Amino acid sequence: MATMRTLVQPVDHAVELSRAGANVTGSGSALLHLAGRHPLGLIGLVIVVVFVLVAAFAPLLATHDPLATNAATSLAAPGGQHMLGADFMGRDLWSRIIYGARISLAVGIASTVVGCVIGAAVGLVSGYWGGWVDLVVQRVNDVLQALPLLVLALVMAASLGPSLTNTIIAISIPVVPHVARVIRASTLSVREMPFVEAARAEGMGELQIALRHVLPNTLAPVIVLATAQLGSAILTEASLSFLGLGIPEPYPSWGRMLSESAAEYVRTAPWLVIFPGLAISLVIFGTNLLGDAVRDVLDPRERS
Amino acid sequence: MPGETATLAATEPAAKAAPAVLEVEGLKTWFFTRGGIVRAVDDVSFSLSEGETLAIVGESGCGKSITALSILGLVPSPPGRIVGGAVRLRGTDLLRVDEEAMRRVRGNEISMIFQEPMTSLNPVLTIGAQIEEALTLHQTALSRAEVRARAVEMLQLVRIPEPERRAKEYPHQLSGGMRQRAMIAMALSCNPRVLIADEPTTALDVTIQAQILELILDLQRRLGTAVILITHDLGVVAETAQRVIVMYAGRKVEEAEVFALFEQPLHPYTRGLMGSIPHLVDETTERLAEIPGMVPALNALPPGCAFAPRCTMATDRCRAEMPPYREWQAGHFSACWHAEALMTGRSPPPLAGEG
Amino acid sequence: MGVDRMLSATPDSAPTPTLPRARGRGNVLEVEGLTKHFAVRKGLLRRAVGKVYAVDGVSFAIAPGETLGLVGESGCGKSTVGRTAMRLIEPTAGSIHLQGQDITRLSRAEMRPHRRAMQIIFQDPYASLNPRIPAGEIVGEPLRVHGLADARQREERVAALFQRVGLRPAQMRNYPHEFSGGQRQRIGIARALALDPALIIGDEPVSALDVSIQAQVINLLRDLQGERGLSYLFIAHDLAVVRHISHRVAVMYLGRIVELAETRALFATPQHPYTEALLAAVPVADPRKRRPRRIIQGDVPSPIRPPPGCHFHTRCPYAEARCRELAPPLKQVAPGHLAACHLR
């Protein structure tokens, strides 16, 4: 009987050992983990990192001035002096794609981040505190969501005028209701969890509970949403630029490169469509792969 | 055994001569997971006689529910697979028959009721429709009207008041106890030979639990159904079962008639379980006996006895060698190197409830 | 002798022979006429169409070092009593005194310092710990919230708490999912202990655990009471567990306390027919004690439309005409033994 009274329980060694691995998660092992568990995620990460590097080191990688026109090389085929050919104004396509990475990524990332942050705040407030705020926010969201993303961005862009900042704002606003809806829905379930009640019993303030205990447990679906959004933001930017409402000429934007060539030159100079299109596809592909993996890695339950 | 006693269970152990309805032999159900092979059920054998109540006891993860699902061929696969053994229903090995034949067995010859009646009932069908469904599947000779009448009759049998009206209601309109009654009605509608009840009262309040247990045992006596009662509650076992199997980490560790088991458990795990439950009637308010530690992960079992890391009697032999499962007294089996000591040697220290 | 006096008994039949640590004068918690009605809302405008009478005039007191068990079946309002007493739910009526101070109407901010004296342990060891926060931080959080220790002291305190509840301090960096159910419950207990409270409300703290683990946690709770002179309000549906840990027990049925007595008296000589029925329904883990039983029939009525008079009359084998009309008051039927039944 005396031995049965021992309070400190001996813990099974095999279980302990298998857990030990999960404890020492530094950033290095997180990467290894990603590679082992999510090889596709690693591919996505590589693609995204490559694009970021390309954007950062654009001046070193570009072979020509992306804005320099040259009538002599108009619509030059790939090869020779122009690796990927040249557009109708004789501008080097490779260099324009390299510089275009800056614009596309800047617009994509910035608008996604802005949209998600605002959306998360709106969703959290409306889900956690509820009441009439929630009622109003939900109805506004309904209206916003009833309009197609592109139309909304169009209206925004048209009223703000073309510029990089305005493009980002125009693209980010339609993201807000989507993110807000997702965050609100999971907030409604998370706020009823006993650990939230435990925090309240500890005497923690409501704002702190919302930020520390509720918000982190609602983010997983938003990360997936955000990565999908990153791709569609780049596409939206392309559409806006095509309509003259996005990034003004002559700055290179993948979207405009693609869309302004699509109608006229797709038969005569298909590379003008293929290469910007490939760039867009590849970056969207990369962000989607990465997004799925990031969601899993961020959840401690998925890690062990 | 009709009309034998007023207590919940038939008090006498099942007659030895009663023919076996169901025989499980060397059943092995393993799960092939990323973390390795999980031997959820490992070499489990037992037989069930007509009209008998066999309890399978153990804590979560001991394999008791997987054993039941294996009998019905309902193990989720992948990752689960029955890698060995036989499940014989009146001589036919259910592990060797095809899915169509198995469907004729499920709900007809072997029925099952689950812990949570709400999730096991379809929320968009009426109670009556769900009972009728089981009947039309298996009792094809019955006409529509007969099926309907039988469904109402079943609800009456499980003592649901106003059965005609209740048959037209949906699961959410019934209380937890009523839903479990409806589940039992459904399970018994085809007059099965074997009823598997997996924690049938765990989700219910104690007064309702008493009603349901009494109902199951009463119907068993009247219909002659053999019952496998899966539970973690030794109180439920003591009040209802004739024979008991104790499982730990996927294996049988002890098997005995209920009186023998409670009188003198021959496995330290069974003893530990009995010591760790608080009692309603003992005079002492002593500390509860604890089983230290926790159930080991099934994919990383120790080489010897799986219970050795938590066992107060464990010796080096226990940690190195798996103890054989053998009969120590007539009908009393145990897998423990120290069963002899538990049986003959010093009488075990008194457990709470025996003081 | 008034009911008030009777409600605040001292734990002279403590299961653990220990001296309760003195904590000021009088009772740790006194609850008087506690009532909580939830509105039943329906439709687009969320109009109240009815009320759930979850708790209906509940009174009790808990002395320092005492465990009051609160038993009843699901829906009887026992969990609501615990949460309302903690001011996690606003009471509809009644008063709550914590260590002599009226906390019934305190604002959230005014309530904060009082939270140190009163903590809670939850039933579900999975849902009660934030999955994204390491165990050590979960346990240290109350200290941080109340600014009671700097980071290093906190680390030490948490390590000591881990050790005390039977966990290894090395496990502080692990996330909740890396622990078993029993270990998680120990984390929950450590969190409740962090502020060194006078009272811990346990809301079914062992009912989600396997029996062998349940015994570990019950023993731990009893040891902690012995060491720290803690008071418990132990809410559970398992009568045997409640009997084992409580000095006094209150039985609830449909929002009301129907019986309240010293544990021994309540289990030996139950005075209310409902308590009797509950005790008769519990299966006894001894096949030799199989007995013919009087099983009460029927279900617990809905708390939205509780029956008039004595709530139990619909299932009571002894019910008379007056039981159907007049709610019996909770009165003393033997020294220290209260029951709400016309027939006693």
Image (spheres, coloured by chain):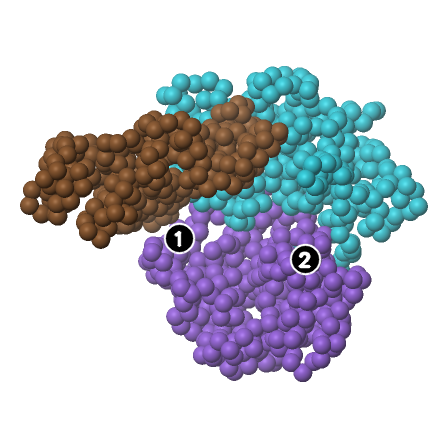
Chain colours: A brown, B purple, C cyan
**In the displayed structure, does residue A90 sit left or right of residue A281?**
left
Front label number (1 vs 2): 2
Question: Would you name the residue on which mark 1 appears?
Answer: B297
* C68 in relation to A225, above or below: above
| Marks 1 and 2, the one that precedes in the sequence | 2
User: Can residue B2 be seen by looking at this rendering?
Assistant: no
- Label 2: few (<14), some (14–19) or many (≥20) C-alpha neighbours in 10 Å: many
Give whichever of C139, C22 is nearer the camera. Answer: C139
**Residue B281: horizontal and vertical position, in percent?**
68, 48
Image quarter (top left, top right, bottom left or bottom right) of the N terminus of chain C: top right
Q: Residue at x 64, y 46 (%)?
A: C238
Q: Residue at x 71, y 39 (%)?
A: C41
Give whichever of A35, C204 is nearer the camera. Answer: A35
User: Can residue B231 be seen by looking at this rendering?
Assistant: yes
Q: CA distance from mark 1 to mark 2?
A: 37 Å
Label 2 marks a residue whose chain is B
**Residue B274: horizontal and vertical position, in percent?**
56, 53
Mark 2 is on which residue type? Pro
Query: Which circle marks residue B239 in the picture?
Result: none
Query: Which circle marks residue B171 in the picture?
Result: 2
Q: Are marks 1 and 2 in contact (CB under 8 Å)?
A: no
**Residue B355: horizontal and vertical position, in percent?**
63, 49
Instruction: Determine whether the residue tagged by mark 1 lies in a helix, strand or loop.
Output: loop
Mark 1 is on which residue type? Ala
The residue at the far right in this view is C321
**Residue B205: horizontal and vertical position, in percent?**
68, 50
Q: Residue at x 65, y 75 (%)?
A: B136
Count of numbered circles on the image = 2
Instruction: Determine whether the residue tagged by mark 2 lies in a helix, strand or loop.
Output: helix
Q: Residue at x 66, y 44 (%)?
A: C237
